Image (cartoon, helix red, strand yellow):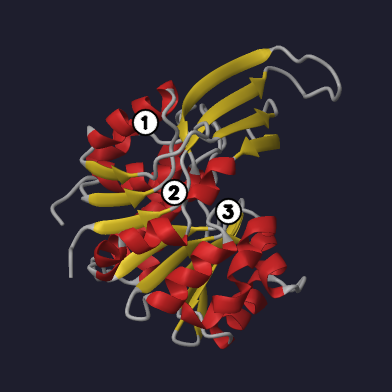
Amino acid sequence: MDKSILLIGGTNIDYLATSNNKLIKHSSNPGTLTISYGGVMRNVCENLARIGNKCYFLTAVGQDLYGKQIIDYMNNLSVEMISPTTNLPTSSYIAINDNNHDMDEGINDMRIMDEINVRFLESYSPLIKNHEYVICDSNLSVEAIDYLFSSFKNQKFLVEGISASKIIKYKNHLKDIYMLKCNIYEARALFNNKLDAISLVKMALDSGIKTAIITQGKDCIIYGEHNKVATIAVKSVYNISGNTTGCGDALFAGIIDHYIEGKSLKDSIIFGQKLSILTLETFKAVNETISSLSYNH
């Protein structure tokens, strides 16, 4: 098996608007606007690359200027970007943050993700089979998810929830998921249940998911494996100089990095928290200074 990491999912251009004062609805609010490369799986991929991992990334980017810039940017991080040929524009995402740097509203245009279809994935079947771990997000279509889980029974799929509306695409493959990382709202949508996080982790394990991690914002992280459930406190951060976009992606990247290296799930989550806290210090989706955490894999 290849020791590199294979990721399949979305890439975006992120437009992040942060209000200087309390947001006033239906009005123009003074603030700051930044543009950066984003997308959940692209963010995870960049984090992994910056801490020393070789990555292959199956994604979809357009032939527009932003698409070409993203490919160059990721290639410079030793990421092998693989994208179908398409005339659709590169995905874009805009987040409106309040003056506390928390997202109030968001809109994304991800039509291009339909280009990651069965035909495209079939053409890279040898690459997928050569990786023990395959990291996926919920931007993939139901058809693509069905194909991956039915065709690659020997692979360990690590899944990121993304949103309550998207995570339900995995509801028919719970027993095939090796690791699920999501927030409590996504977990409640997936299991169609309003239970607390501890109960939802137990439900995930009972459904056949090998490892489950549920975040709750500023509240503790609940995780479980081998029919055991535990909690990890979330470190309080009082002065956020950047924004919260990308923090969950950094957490997942840290978990992936340490877990596939053989570290315990607890230690993997703790490392992921370090990356997540660093992400709060930047307006970009990834804090470039996490490269200081790199080590020999």
Residue 289, percent across and down? 30, 33
Residue topped by disc 3? 162
Question: Quick check: 10 above or below 65?
Answer: below
Residue 269, percent across and down? 41, 61
Q: Residue at x 27, y 51 (%)?
A: 56
Query: How would you rate the neighbour count of disc 1 (Cα within 10 Å): few for under 14, some for 14-19, many for 20 or more?
Result: many
Residue topped by disc 1? 70
Q: Please indicate, yes or no, whether residue 161 appears anywhere in the rendered image.
A: yes
Question: Quick check: 147 above or below 78?
Answer: below
Q: Residue at x 22, y 32 (%)?
A: 76
Of pointers 3 and 1, the one earlier in the residue sequence: 1
Residue 8, percent across and down? 40, 55
Q: Looking at numbered disc 3 in the image, what kind of residue is underneath it?
A: Ile
Q: CA distance from mark 2 to mark 1?
A: 13 Å
Instruction: Between residue 158 and residue 197, name the one nearer to us.
Output: 158
Badge number at residue 41? 2
